[in-house]
Amino acid sequence: MTNRKKLIALGIFLLAILGLIMRMHTPSVAEQEVAEATAPEHSLIAVIPDIPTLANYQSQPSGLIMPAVNEKLNGPVKRLEYQKITYSEIGESGRYYSSLATERTVEFDRDGHVTGCYEGDYKVEYKYDETGVLREKVESLDLGYDVLSQKYFFSYEAGRTAHINMTIGEQTILAQTITLTSEGYEVWDYVYQDDLSLSGIDKTFYDSAGRRLRSILQPLDGGDGEVWYEAVYGSNGELVSEHTSLRSGVESREYFYDELGNIIKRVVQRESGGTSSYDYAYEYDEQGRILTVISDGDIEFFYYDEKGNIAAHVHRRSFNNYDDVRRYTFDYYGNWIEIQRTMGKYNQVLPVNYRLIEYYE
């Protein structure tokens, strides 16, 4: 696959993934009428496939049960830069030297909109109109000898539908449509062949809380389509089960929770006949915060500072009883600015992560 095709595929993939993580507010009838009469675009803002705004910008924790270190940004953030210090050994001397590298940079405007995200030779930039509505997104990849770019244009229809068009060379194609419904909203991702002929529509449906309900690959002949993802939720909004059918196989997952809403059991059943079960046990403090998690012999410990931030996280691995320790330092606004990590029997020092955060005055 050529670099240009890779960029196109990446753009379509990012739209699909970012669309899945959005959350929305379902407007009342009165709000809908006001939105349609004044600025109809605003009733769709919450479900536009943009990098999240400052209000909900965060790195998702890995795993199902690990509490999130306070990744949500506080304060009037202007610029966010992720840096890492790595240590390398020099020959046989046993001496180490450190180097500092910037991994990713994110910039925000005063309204909390992401205006740019930069990671090495890849960057994404966003343009908004005077009312704060997203109008254009530009992705670019600098290959050294050439710069590949991809543009997306956002248009809105009667406060109910958003259309995202993308340019490929001299052509413009419809990449995605988002429509508000009485139950929530639905996202249509248009699937194209290499010659840019439309081959189908991947439709994903969400409820009013932004929970993914099902995904259907709809053929162009108007048939019923293939349901390749379906989820069931409990009375408290928790994910009870999900079923996925892909080329790689069919898989069903069930989830069980304790009274505080944390997963205590996860069962995965595969078409091949294999079934895996994962159990979790917790200890809580008087405030209901997780202190320890036990799973398959591994133990995780969480330590909190006086402001409720997770100041340290220890993962003790069952196969060698060694600890993986992360210690966090926070700034005035409660945003973490440093993570120090040690691991193993001799507390080997691993790369140190920094976040340089610049604030608006």
Image: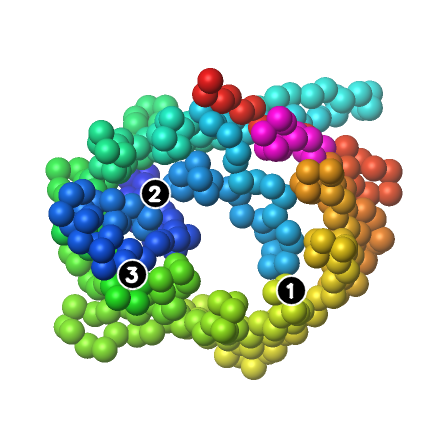
Residue 174 image position (x, y, % from top left): 18, 50
| Res. 185 mark | 3
Q: Is residue 118 above or below residue 28?
A: above
In contact (CB < 8 Å): disc 1 and disc 3: no
Residue 32 image position (x, y, % from top left): 21, 54
Residue 200 or residue 51, whichever sits in front: 51
Q: In the displayed structure, does residue 132 sit left or right of residue 108?
A: left
Residue 194 or residue 100, whichever sits in front: 100
The range drawn in magenta is 328-341
Viewer can see residue 280: yes
Q: Earlier in the sequence, mark 1 or mark 2?
A: 2
Queried whether the magenta region covers residue 330, the answer comes back as yes
CA distance for labels 3 and 2: 16 Å
Task: Please report the residue visible at 76 percent of the width from the left and 22 percent of the height from the top.
Answer: 96
Query: Neighbour class for label 3 at 10 Å: few (<14), some, many (≥20)?
Result: many
Q: In the rendered image, which residue does mark 2 sit on?
A: 50
| Local SS, label 2 | loop
| Local SS, label 3 | strand
Q: In the rendered image, which residue does mark 1 sit on?
A: 260
Q: Residue type at mark 1?
A: Leu
Q: Earlier in the sequence, mark 1 or mark 3?
A: 3
Q: Residue type at mark 3?
A: Tyr
